[in-house]
Image (tube, rainbow, N blue to C red):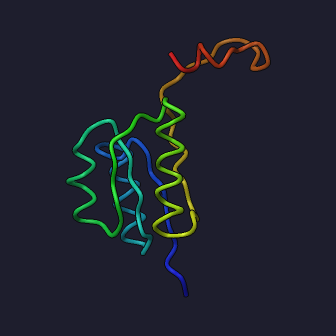
Amino acid sequence: MTQKVAVVTAASKGMGAACATELAQRGYDMVLMSRSDAVLELVKNLQGMGMQGNVMNPADLERVVSAALQRFGRIDKRDRKNRGVLALGPCRLYHRAKYLR
């Protein structure tokens, strides 16, 4: 069976590092991204690759997805952690620029 691949962002500490470690223990190849270069240390202990980037930057998200697909040819799981963004009001009225602040 082909190894599964997971992409985890905000992966250098806390919930992100815990998710990455758990998925690696379950046998996933890992693609990790974080603003901190600590992600590069974490990935040394896991099977996969790490890169610096900001989840709020669409170009960085494209880069991590492209890197995962180029190296592994697939993505089976991506993280869905809360990014700490609180949007008040109807979703249809919430402008993307406010979310990206």
Residue placed farthest to the bottom in the image?
1
* 74 w.r.t. 12: above or below: below
User: Residue 44 versus residue 87: which sits nearer the camera?
Assistant: 44
Q: Residue at x 39, y 41 (%)?
A: 10
Residue placed farthest to the right in the image?
92
Left-right relation of 2 to 11: right
Number of disc labels: 0
Q: Residue at x 43, y 72 (%)?
A: 26
Q: Position of residue 2 (x, y in %)?
A: 54, 82
Q: Residue at x 33, y 50 (%)?
A: 17
Q: Position of residue 12 (x, y in %)?
A: 29, 45
* 12 w.r.t. 59: above or below: below
Quadrant assignment, res 42: bottom left
* 76 w.r.t. 32: above or below: below
Q: Position of residue 66 (x, y in %)?
A: 52, 54
Left-right relation of 68 to 90: left
Instruction: Tell me the quadrant of the picture where the N terminus can be found.
Output: bottom right
User: Residue 44 versus residue 51: which sits nearer the camera?
Assistant: 51
Q: Residue at x 55, y 45 (%)?
A: 80
Left-right relation of 76 to 22: right
